[in-house]
Image: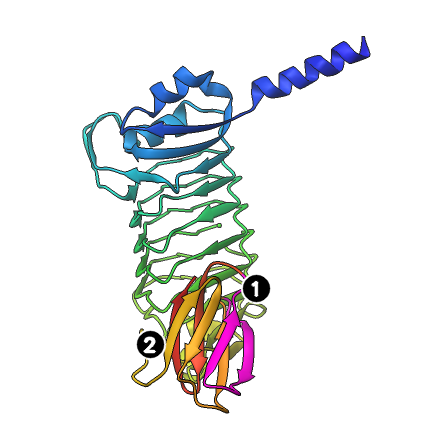
Amino acid sequence: MKKLILLFIGLFITVISQALTVVSTAGGLYNVIHSSGNIKIVSDITVTGTIDARDFSTMRDSMPNLQSVNLSGANIVAYTGTGGTVSTSSTVYPANEIPENAFHGKSGLSSIILPSSTTSIANEAFIWCAYLTSVTIPSSVTSIGSYAFYSCTNLSSITIPPSVTSIGDNAFYLCSSLTSINIPLSINSIGNLAFAGCTGLTSIYAYAATPSGLTSSINVFYSVDKSTCILHVPIGSKTAYQGAIQWQDFTTIEEGLPAAVNNAMASKLKISIQNGHVILTGVTVGELITVYNLQGIAIYNQKADTEEVTVSLPAHGIYVVRVGTESVKVMY
């Protein structure tokens, strides 16, 4: 009898949870998943091929058990019609955009990897995804819409890639489990209340030497404890942040991030990436070489003893290599 009970439990777990990998054509995800089994029990899905707003509607509305989504190998194509994520009226959905209301209120969703070709995250894309803990945003994204991650209360960390130039109103409002954020130097617009309610923030890394102008933005960091949250800024820019509206409200502003990032160095120095290593050639012997990760932490800090220096990188990501007084951004 005990063995029968254990067998039943095992079968029950299998039935209520299923991982699936599918190849989709735009608008056809529902049929592909439905033909592969019971669409209502799929918990983890990896999608390749093409998708559009209709397929986001399928994941949001027809897959109640969905928890983990990997779209890294999928491409979002344009769609105009009534079957998308916004309403029953005809709507235009651009290509390469996570559509508006894509996962609106999808409480069970815990992790998602966005398509590598994504260029924008539309308004309210992940609003009220209360159990979302992990989002992988590709380096192709340039804008994050208003209310995009509103009330994602369990989102503990998120990396805003250096390609992003604008963050909309209330984008991360209440996103309270968040302890650290990186604001890349590419940002030139941060909307009203963008990080309001992020009461768990202890560190903010702002990479722009000149603070992003917040004069016309209301309460960007409302209810963040500015007496305990440390604002990390580039070397030589502390005074600028101390005099900038809203940035000046932080009690502790620490310098330490690279002062400038150039796309190339106008010298004999050459930098390349090979098999997880940064290779620097043409280095001046005795020159200080420092490699920072996106958190501003130095993972390498030594003076060159030869004209070629090799630095091992701990993981895939974006790094800043500083040689003497010049810096360059590299991606591995």
Quarter-of-image position of residue 115: top left
How crowded pointer 2 is (Cα within 10 Å; few <14, some 14-19, many 20+) is rated as: few
Q: Quadrant of the C terminus?
A: bottom left
Q: Position of residue 69 (x, y in %)?
A: 45, 36
Q: Is residue 5 left or right of residue 117?
A: right
Please provide percent x and percent y for residue 54. Answer: 29, 28
Residue that appears at 52% across and 54% down: 157
Q: CA distance from mark 2 to mark 1?
A: 29 Å
Mark with earlier residue (2, 1): 1
Disc 2 target residue:
262
Residue occupying the far right of the picture: 2
Say which residue label 1 marks.
202
Q: Amino acid at mark 1?
A: Thr
Disc 2 residue type? Asn
- Res. 245 visible in picture: no
Bounds of the magenta segment: 295-314
SS state under label 2: loop
Q: Looking at the image, can residue 112 be seen?
A: yes
